[in-house]
Each structure stands twice: as C-alpha cells, then as structure tokens.
Image (cartoon, rainbow, N blue to C red):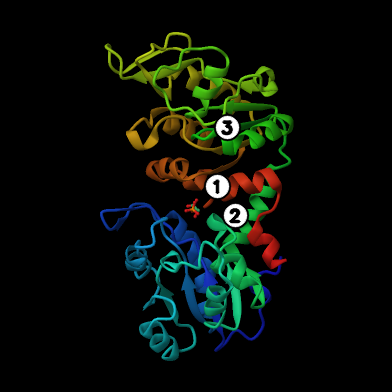
Amino acid sequence: MKPVTQIENLKGRYVVLRSSLNLPVADGVVTNEYRLKKALPTMRYLSEAGARIIVLGHIGRKPEETLKPVFDVLQNYLPVQWGGVIGGDECVKRREMMQDGDILMVENTRQHEGETVSDPEFAKQIAELGEVFVNDAFAVAHRSHASTTGVAALLPSYGGLTLLQEIQKLSAVMKPTSPSLFIIGGAKFETKMPLVEKYLNVYNHTFIGGALVNDVLKAKGFEVGTSLVSDVSLEGASFLDDPKLLMPVDLVVDGGTTGRRTCDIDQVQSDEAILDVGPKTVAMLRDYIQKAATILWNGPFGNYEGGYVEATEAVAKLIAESGAQSVVGGGDTVAAIEKLGINDQFTHVSTGGGAMLQFLENGTLPVIDSII
Ligand code: 3PG
C-alpha cells in the first residue's frame, strides 16, 4: 500500500482524509478518545506539510447522529474548523477560505443516504473536495462505503500512518511465536466462528470467553438458563473437541432466586444468565498468559456494559505484566485497558473491532484492496 509519506508536493493541496472518528458518546459527550488520539499523527503530518485537509468520518448507525462532540474534543488537540454537511453552503464557503495547513472537519458521512450503499454520486461529491485521498480509518476498513472504497476509486489514494501501523502489527501476530495464546470474547458466534476455527490451527491455545461461551456450553449439553446465545447452533462443530480449545471453569451468573453468584460451569440454573467468567478461570488463564510469547485478544469476558468487568480487567492486567508480544482490540476490551491506564504496556492496541477480526481472518480488507 502506498503510504501517506509518499505523497509529493503536499503544500497547498487539498487532501480528503478519512479517519476513524466514531468514538463512544454518551449524553453528547465523548467517553473514550482512543481512536481520536490514533487519528492525530496523520492529521499532524499532513498539516505540517502544508496540505489543506478535509477530514471525514462517520459516527453511529442512525443518520441523525452528529460528529459535533468529536469535533469539540479534536479542538483540544489541533486547530480545526467545522465544515457542516458535505455539499452544504458552510462546507463550500469554509473550504474556499482554507489556508495551507488548515484542517476542516465535516459532518457524519452517514447523514448522507449514499454513504453505506456506496453511491457513486456521493463518492464523486466527496472526491470533488480534494485532489488526493488518504484513508487512515482502520476501524471502518471492512466497510465498502462511499467515503472509504468509493472515493479511493476516484482520487490518487494512500494509506494513513495509523492504518499502516495496524496492518503491520496485526500481520505480525498472524504468525505467532510459541507458546501462543488467542483469547476471543464478546458475542455473536455467527461472525466469529471462522476466526476461531482458523486460529485454533495457528495458536497453541485458544480461550473462548464472553457470551460466546454460552454457545459452547449449550452445544456441549450444559444448562445456560436465560443467557444470551447466538443465532447459530454449534452442535456437532468439530472444533469443540479440539484439545487446544480452552473453556472457563467457573462462571458469574445472576437472575435466579439466589441473585448474583459464582458457580462451576455445570451448576447454572434455568432461571439464571451467565454474565462473566469467575476467579478460577482467571487463575487458570494466568498460567497460560505468564508462559506465552504471543497473546492476541479481542472481546470482553463478561457483559461489560452491564458492569461485569472484573475478569476482563484482571486479564488485561495479567497480559500487561506478562512481557509477551501482546495485541488487543475491540471496543470494550480497549475501554477496559484505557480505564486501567495500561495502554503502553501492550505491543499494540488496535482501533478496530470488526475490522480487526476480519483482517485476522482474511489477511486483507476492502479498504486495503482499494488503495493498493
Ligand atoms: C466500528 O466502530 O467498529 C467501526 O467503525 C464500524 O462501525 P459500523 O459497525 O457501524 O460500521
């Protein structure tokens, strides 16, 4: 992929920059700035080279969502102007007024109907904002949208610094040094099954946590009560008997007559839901983590948003202290690491959730293919 550093004569040129700006927002306030901080190096590089940068990104899935809260935070790091919606009067006017090195941030690309369907007309409208396109948005690199792959077909296109770093760091753990440990949590086996099957063959051990465990337990004939399960059934899946597959040995459950409690995996009651893994499981993982040379982790162990954070945070600390080559990703996993302030103790903290998983599965992504 052509890196942004290969663009010649940046001074005075209009550059369309696609960044990962979809930060978590609660009550109009950004709650985690990690992705934005990773978007800064490419913005700074282009600005210092004298480019006139039009930054675009999406946020959320509803068209009415706005990037304004992200803009407010970005102003704390860089001088940046607000351009409003792409194609609007404000956008046209502000763009004309730009000086070398200026940054103009425009509104959520998903406010336009053409974005997610990759409408060529909308891609053209974006392309007309600049002379060169830089894609630095790894978190959305698995989406073929107008502002990602669409515009790349219309302008000379380059990879941003964070996109390139993600590819390099994730590629490295696709061929791990032994002993290696792959940890996968979160939910939705329907999207993660191919990855689990692939990494069982690549890593020495694969631990399944999060709501994915519920599917495994169910397929193995255990009671899972009212736990969240995936749309797919794992019954008969051959990987369930793979000796490299590690399972929790205890669970945190709630909802039954006894309330929140910790129990062994064969003691879940029909009116209880599995919400986290228990302390014996964390202790079991400690041994594998301390011996590992490579650790790859995506997805929390428990219902993180519901406050079941204990095991996820305990494992995050163990990995941070382990000295292993460690690559982690996924929104809730990164939130846990940020909360603990231990980012720097990991080899790489990915900005991607779905994009990270898809890259690990296929070794490429639509956005990467669009730039090469
Ligand atoms: C993410 O937040 O993981 C990506 O940016 C993708 O967002 P999307 O799932 O709404 O497309």
- Which of 181 and 331 lies nearest the eye of the viewer? 331
- Which of 333 and 93 lies nearest the eye of the viewer? 93
Marks 2/3: CA distance?
A: 21 Å
Looking at the image, is 356 positioned above or below residue 249? below
Whether disc 1's CB lies below 8 Å from ligand 1 is answered yes
Is residue 262 something that shows in the picture?
yes
Task: Name the kind of residue labelled 3 in the image.
Answer: Ile
Q: Reading the chain from its start, which is encountered first: label 3 or label 1?
A: 3
- Which mark is in front, 3 or 1? 1
Where does residue 218 sit, x and y in percent of width and height? 52, 18
Element under label 2? loop
Q: Mark 2 and 1 residues: CB-CB less than 8 Å, in contact?
A: yes
Where does residue 336 sit, x and y in percent of width and height? 41, 40
Looking at the image, is 318 positioned above or below residue 330? above
Looking at the image, is 101 positioned above or below residue 111? below
Q: Reading the chain from its start, which is encountered first: label 2 or label 3?
A: 2
Whether residue 100 sits left or right of residue 220 in the image: it is left
Element under label 1? helix
Q: Quadrant of the N terminus?
A: bottom right
Task: Name the kind of residue labelled 1 in the image.
Answer: Gly
